[in-house]
Image (cartoon, rainbow, N blue to C red):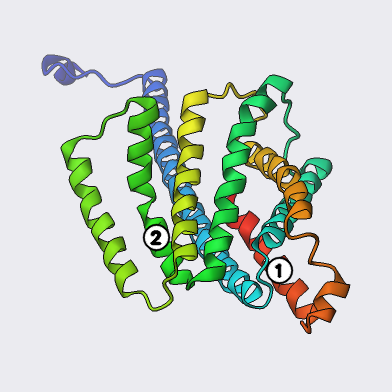
C-alpha cells in the first residue's frame, strides 16, 4: 500500500468500480440506441422510396391500359362525349363509395369553395373531352405527341395571366419540343385536323386548369387534400357533362342502341368500364 501511495496509484473502491461500470453500460446503451434509430430512419427512407416506385409503376400501368381499352372502344363506338361521361360517372361512383365507407375522409367544403373549384371542373371536363375526341380521330401515339406541347402552353399561359415571364433558358428548352411536334405532325400517317386541333385544345384547357389553380389559390380545409379535391372535380365534371351528352349525342350507351349497331354488348361495356376505372386510377 505504501508503494502504491508513493507512485500516486490508489485502488478504486467498490462503489467507484460500480459507478464506472454503470457509465460504460450507459455509453454502450446510448450507442446501441443511436444505431437502432439510424437503422429505423434508413428503413423508413427505403420503404418510402419503394412505395414511390410502386406508385410510379401503377401510374404507368393504369395509363397504358386506359389508352389501349379506350382506343378499342372509340374505334367501334365513336361517341367521345358519351365515353367521357361514362368515365366521369365511374369516377364519381368510386369517389362516393370511398367517402361512404370511410376509405377516404369526407371533405368539409363550403359553397364558396365549390364556386372556386367550378372553373377548375369546367376546364378539367373540357380537357378530358378534347383528349377523347383526339384519341378517336388519330393514333394514340400521335395524340400524346401533340400533348407533349403542354409545357409550352404552361409557360405561355403563366406569362399571360400570372405575369411569370420565362427565362431565356426555359424558352430555348421549349424549342426542341415545338420542333419535334411540328416534325411529327408533318410525317404522321394518321394526321387529320380534327384530331390535331382536339389534342391542342386539350393542352390549352389542362394548362388553363393549372394556371387557374395557382390564380385562385384555394384555401383548403384540413380534409380537402389533393385526392379529395380531384374527387370533387370529378363529381362536378360528371354533372357538367351529363346534360351536354343528352343535348348533343344523346344516350348511346344503352343496350338497345349498341345491339342495333351490331356491336358486342358485353365487350363494349367491359372495355369501357376497364378504361374508365384506369382513367380514374391514373389521374388520382
Q: Which residue bears the numbered disc 1?
A: 272
Q: Residue 143 appears in which quarter of the rendering? A: bottom left
Q: Is residue 235 left or right of residue 209?
A: right
Image quadrant in which you'd find residue 186? bottom left
3D distance between C-alphas at marks 1 and 2: 24 Å
Q: Earlier in the sequence, mark 1 or mark 2?
A: 2
| Disc 1: CA contacts within 10 A as few (<14), some (14-19) or many (>=20) | many
Does residue 15 sit above or below 271 in this rendering? Answer: above
The answer to whether residue 192 of the structure is visible from this angle is yes
Q: Farthest residue in the left direction? A: 7
The image quadrant of residue 187 is bottom left
Q: Secondary structure at mark 2?
A: helix
Residue 209 position (above or below residue 89): above
Task: Name the one closer to the observer, 15 or 122.
Answer: 122
Asked if the residue at tag 2 contacts the one at tag 1, i.e. Cβ–Cβ closer than 8 Å, the answer is no
**17 to 256, vertically: above or below:** above
The x and y percentages for residue 177 are 27, 56
Apparent side of residue 176 relative to residue 237 in the rendered image (left or right): left
User: In x, y percent, where is residue 40?
Assistant: 47, 43
The residue to which callout 2 is attached is: 146
Please give left or right for residue 260 compared with residue 25 in the image.
right
Secondary structure at badge 1 equals helix
Placement of the N terminus among the 4 image quadrants: top left
Residue depicted at x 42% and y 26%: 22
Coordinates of residue 68 in the picture (x, y in percent):
57, 73
Q: Nearer the viewer, residue 282 or 32?
A: 282
Q: Residue at x 65, y 23 (%)?
A: 221
Amino acid at each position: 500500500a505504501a508503494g502504491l501511495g508513493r507512485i500516486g496509484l490508489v485502488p478504486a473502491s467498490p462503489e467507484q468500480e460500480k459507478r464506472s461500470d454503470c457509465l460504460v453500460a450507459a455509453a454502450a446503451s446510448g450507442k446501441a440506441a443511436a444505431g437502432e434509430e439510424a437503422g429505423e430512419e434508413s428503413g423508413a427512407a427505403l420503404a418510402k422510396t419503394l412505395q414511390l416506385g410502386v406508385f410510379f409503376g401503377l401510374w404507368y400501368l393504369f395509363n397504358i391500359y386506359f389508352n389501349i381499352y379506350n382506343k378499342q372502344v372509340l374505334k367501334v363506338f365513336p361517341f367521345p362525349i358519351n365515353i367521357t361521361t361514362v368515365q366521369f360517372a365511374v369516377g364519381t361512383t368510386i369517389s362516393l363509395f370511398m367517402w361512404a365507407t370511410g376509405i377516404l375522409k369526407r371533405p368539409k367544403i363550403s359553397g364558396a369553395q365549390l364556386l372556386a373549384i367550378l372553373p377548375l371542373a369546367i376546364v378539367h371536363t373540357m380537357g378530358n373531352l378534347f383528349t377523347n375526341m383526339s384519341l378517336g380521330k388519330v393514333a394514340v401515339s400521335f395524340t400524346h405527341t401533340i400533348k407533349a406541347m403542354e409545357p409550352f402552353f404552361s409557360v405561355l399561359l403563366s406569362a399571360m395571366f400570372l405575369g411569370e415571364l420565362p427565362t431565356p433558358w426555359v424558352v430555348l428548352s421549349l424549342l426542341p419540343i415545338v420542333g419535334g411536334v411540328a416534325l411529327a405532325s408533318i410525317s404522321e400517317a394518321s394526321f387529320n385536323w380534327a384530331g390535331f386541333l382536339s389534342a391542342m385544345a386539350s393542352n390549352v384547357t389542362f394548362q388553363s386548369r393549372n394556371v387557374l389553380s395557382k390564380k385562385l389559390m384555394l384555401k383548403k380545409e384540413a380534409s380537402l387534400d389533393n385526392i379529395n379535391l380531384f374527387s370533387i372535380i370529378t363529381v362536378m365534371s360528371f354533372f357538367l357533362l351529363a346534360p351536354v351528352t343528352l343535348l348533343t349525342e344523346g344516350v348511346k350507351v344503352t343496350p338497345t342502341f349498341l345491339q342495333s349497331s351490331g356491336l358486342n354488348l358485353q365487350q363494349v361495356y367491359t372495355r369501357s368500364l376497364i378504361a374508365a376505372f384506369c382513367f380514374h386510377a391514373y389521374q388520382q
